[in-house]
Image: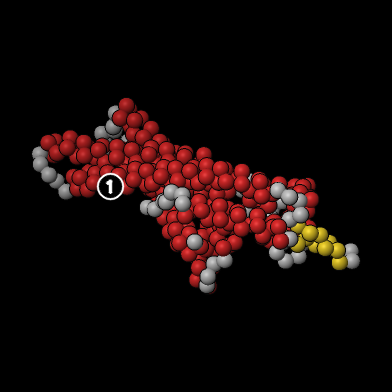
Amino acid sequence: MTDHTLQQFGDELKSFFVLVLLNMAFGALALGFGMQIIIATFLQYAAAEPPSVVLSTARILVGITGMCIGFFWILASMKILRGIKGIRKEYRTSARTGPVPAETLTGWIVALLAHYRENRTVLWRMTLISIAGGLFYLALGIANLVEGSLALPAAGGPVPSMVAFFGAAPINSGIGIVTLYVALRFRRYAGTWDLRLKLADEGEESLKKALESR
Amino acid sequence: MAERRTSYEIYWEILVYCRTPRTFTAIIGRCDLNSKTGQEYLGFLVSRGFLAVEKDGEKSTYIATDRAAEYTALFTRLYQGLFDKGPEFRV
């Protein structure tokens, strides 16, 4: 039983670690994009034709939203990562050095279960932040397309500067779709561990009996 | 591991750690307990016959009894079963 359990445990740990790292990267991107939007808006005021107040206010609000989402995204990911880093390190070291005793594996399972109990709310919050982040990227992609399409007739045809709009659109939309996928995986992860918590709770009755029997 | 563990998980950690004789200080250090809760957990396990106290002069150590093996085996089976029988997660 241990070999199969160990394999599954390792696969899940790896998958989850990748998900959290991806989340951190997307969080950093959202923070960067938010900042970029704000800076670009302020830079436009230095141009000969300053943008309308309504448009720049909207842009700054979008930028601040992006920065906030990115900031909380990174914070939540870091909190989750801190909890699993130690277990992952132990797992990698032990798996390399030879067979893992059943007690060691059970200890890791206990540690992950405790980590999930502790961070259940953060994980669900992170799922929501990932969804918000994914929608933010998708909105950016759509905005790029709209801006490019609006600028096209004014420029009298395709010009090199359009590359920025039409190039950014698929990139942002792509990141948005991947982020939404990651959010779904987080939901699946949380669902899986919710069920495990339930199974562990159900098993407590037999542990209680074993402790109290004489 | 100072995170939220159930009392059954803490009992299991203590019993596995006490397969060789351990002092009170070593147990609470390893299992991340304070003196008060450590006393409570150890007191319970001793009273139920899962731990035995060995005195060596001034020093007292705790060691898991044969009864403890039944509990740790059941616990291991249950917790590993969460991965064997339970749902699976993969990216």
Q: Is residue B73 left or right of residue B89?
A: right
Within 10 Å of disc 1 (Cα), the crowding (few <14, some 14-19, many 20+) is some
- Near-viewer residue (B51 or A15): B51
Q: Where is mark 1, residue-wise?
A: A174
- Near-viewer residue (B53 or A12): B53
Q: Is residue B33 left or right of residue A70?
A: right
Residue with the most extreme front position: A214
Q: Is residue B6 visible?
A: yes
Give the chain letter at badge 1: A
Percent x, y of residue A189: 43, 47
Secondary structure found at label 1 = helix
- Near-viewer residue (A64 or A7): A7
Q: Is residue A154 left or right of residue A23?
A: left
| Figure colour scheme | secondary structure
Q: Is residue A40 visible?
A: no
Residue with the most extreme top position: A54
Percent x, y of residue A42: 36, 38
Q: Residue at x 53, y 73 (%)?
A: A97
Q: Residue at x 63, y 46 (%)?
A: B6
Look at the picture and state if B27 lies above or below A50: below
Q: How many marks?
A: 1
Q: Quadrant of residue A63?
A: top left
Q: Residue at x 76, y 65 (%)?
A: B21
